[in-house]
Amino acid sequence: MLGVTLKGRMRFVSVVITAMLLVAAMAWAGISLAGGTPTSAADDNQTNFRFVSNSNAATIGGVAHRMLMNGTGKVTASQVVGSGSFVHINSAAPVPKTILASGTWKAKRLVSFNLIGTYGSLAAGTLEMEVDLILDFPSPAVIPATLEIICNLSPAGLLTDEEEGFILTIDGAPFGQFKPKVPADQTSGLSVFTTGNEKRD
């Protein structure tokens, strides 16, 4: 009996030590025991972004290339997560405008992120990232591109040197870059960065 009891105690101690080491490792890695979700101090410094906007490229052969694009995501000093959708149209065509391509996009890598100032929970600046354009029309394809999002806050006097909206660059595209219309009008769209992150249950 003594041998069995001693063996049982040793097994119990081993389990307790293993559990303590596991908890310590999870805490060091920033894993929440309640939800199993990775956490990081960087989460407190993340900036949210969203945009719904139109940008124009060149007109070639009577086709006026325009990109209707939207998206949302989060960015820190080291990484970006984001996605959205797009429709590439011929804006010179009669309504309904001819759709040249459509699909979704996904952020791949952060190129640069520059906030020029905050105004309450809003912020102004620029975000540039490498993205994949995932076409579902006219045929499935994945096209690498660079997406820059620009946010200006006129009421705060926080203005970048660029027009509000987005710049989309597709290497080798004959129509060039998609850029915000200059001057921007009420149909061009809106971009916004927000620094507030809700933490209440």
Image: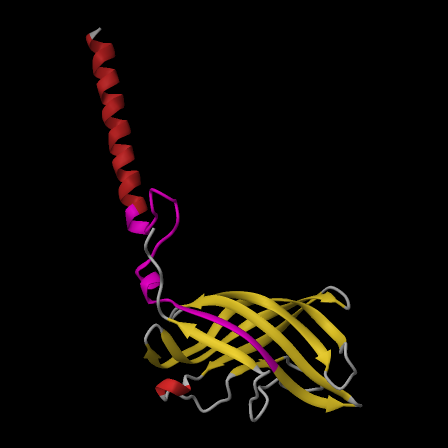
Q: Is residue 94 above or below residue 16?
A: below
Q: Is residue 80 visible?
A: no
Residue extending farthest bottom = 183
**In the depicted structure, whether residue 162 falls above or below residue 199:** below
Q: Where is residue 200 shown, x and y percent of the image? A: 32, 54
The residue closer to the viewer here, 11 or 196, is: 196
Looking at the image, residue 120 lies above or below residue 63? above
| Location of residue 132 by image quarter | bottom right
16 or 176, nearer to the observer:
176
Q: Position of residue 6 (x, y in %)?
A: 21, 15
Whether residue 111 is visible, yes or no, is yes
Q: Please report the residue visible at 68 percent of the width from the left and 73 percent of the height from the top.
A: 87
Give the extent of the magenta segment. Answer: 27-54
Residue 169 highlighted magenta (yes or no): no
**Which of the pair 154/103 is nearer the observer?**
154
Left or right of 147 on screen, residue 120: left
* Picture quadrant where residue 139 is located: bottom right
Total label count? 0
Q: Position of residue 9 (x, y in %)?
A: 22, 19
Position of 96 with respect to 190 (left or right) is: right
Quadrant that contains the N terminus: top left
Q: Residue drawn 33% across and 63% down?
A: 42
Q: Is residue 58 above or below residue 17?
A: below
Q: Is residue 49 magenta?
A: yes
Q: For the view shown, which residue lies furthest in the top direction?
A: 1
Q: Which residue is rendered at x = 32% and y = 63% of the image?
A: 44
Q: Is residue 79 left or right of residue 60?
A: left
Q: Position of 60 compared to 200: left or right?
A: right
Residue 12, how many percent across, how many down? Answer: 25, 23
Seen at 64% across and 79% down, the residue is 170
